[in-house]
Amino acid sequence: MTRSALSRRVVVPAVTGAVVAAAAAVAIGTTVTDHDGGPATEPVAAVAPDHHHGPGITSAPGDAELAPFDLVKTSVRRQGDTVVFTEQVRGRAGAITPTPVGEFGGSSVLSYVWPVSLDASTVGFTEDSGTLALAATSHPDFDDTPLVDENGNGRKDDDGGLWHAHWVVLVPDTTRPDGALKVRDILPGETPALPATWPGAPIYIDSPSYPTTLTGQTVRIAVPMRALGFPEWFSYDGVTAALKVHADLHDPLLRVENVFDVASGDLSLPGRFRK
């Protein structure tokens, strides 16, 4: 499948080619707010290859209409005892955030995502429960990091609009015929394994409070090696996408609505991290 077939189409980290192919046919618009009157379009400097970790994933600019979500370089590299997940974009990273709607149901989430080949149990979810993905997200209508006061105002329930890190588990949304993905729901009566920093939402999500920075055209999340169990290697990809909270707060609670760009073009997870 080509990049053009997936660009700005529904589905983030996919599970198999069949799911990707079905989801690529869907496109749903998302309302966003541009904080500087328009995305920057300066070229991104080339990144030197790292022969220990591989060269990362280089993507042609212009695949996404929104420059802050147009991927040009995706990489995962070790720095000491930390694994740094990085995405570079054509515009200013984080320049666009969702427009608030005033309530949780029907609200939007914007994200920079790294789907990985690691099993979901690596970070504390039930084994073989779906596709594990790290994400930097912004969603001003709700806060899902109850342990952290990101904006330093003495409250821990009002800073969801600031970019922050999550682990999520993605599975096909069986309520739709197009193969789109959703964050896996926790259904009534289910008692799955969950990370210690699960925020209490009835979905497979973790709020680990990893340092998350958006500077210039680069998004970075720093993950402690110990949080990943010191893996010898894993594969990865890069995605930028919008998600939406179901208006009725029913299954699915949080589904992928619009994919802006896919680093590899086909979600083949060609990036390689090696310890």
Image (cartoon, grey):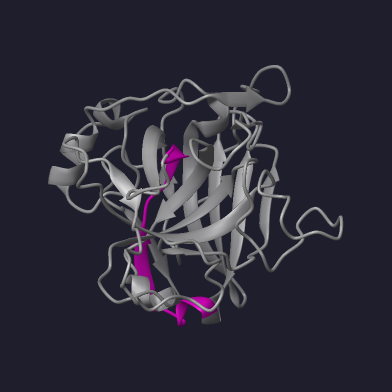
Splitting the image into 4 quarters, where does residue 62 fall?
top left
Above or below, 117 against 89 in this view is: below
Task: Tell me the residue at 28%/25% (across/down).
Answer: 4
Q: Is 39 contained in the magenta span?
A: no
- Residue shown at 38%/34% (left/top)? 259
Q: Residue at x 55, y 43 (%)?
A: 104
Q: Which of the two residues, 160 or 103, is positioned nearer the viewer here?
A: 103
State which region is magenta: 227-247
Residue 201: x percent and y percent?
49, 61
Quadrant showing the N terminus: top left
Res. 52 image quadrant: bottom left
User: In this rendering, does residue 141 appear at all?
Assistant: yes
Along the viewing direction, whichever of 196 and 263 lies nearer the viewer:
196
Horizontal side of residue 147 vs 86, given as left or right? right
Residue 233, magenta (yes or no) = yes
In the picture, the quarter occupied by the C terminus is bottom left
Who is closer to the viewer here, 1 or 179? 179
Q: Please state the total of marks drawn on the protein image.
A: 0
- Up-down relation of residue 271 to residue 52 (above or below): above
Measuring 35% from the left and 68% from the top, which residue is drawn there?
A: 234
Q: Position of residue 106 (x, y in %)?
A: 48, 35
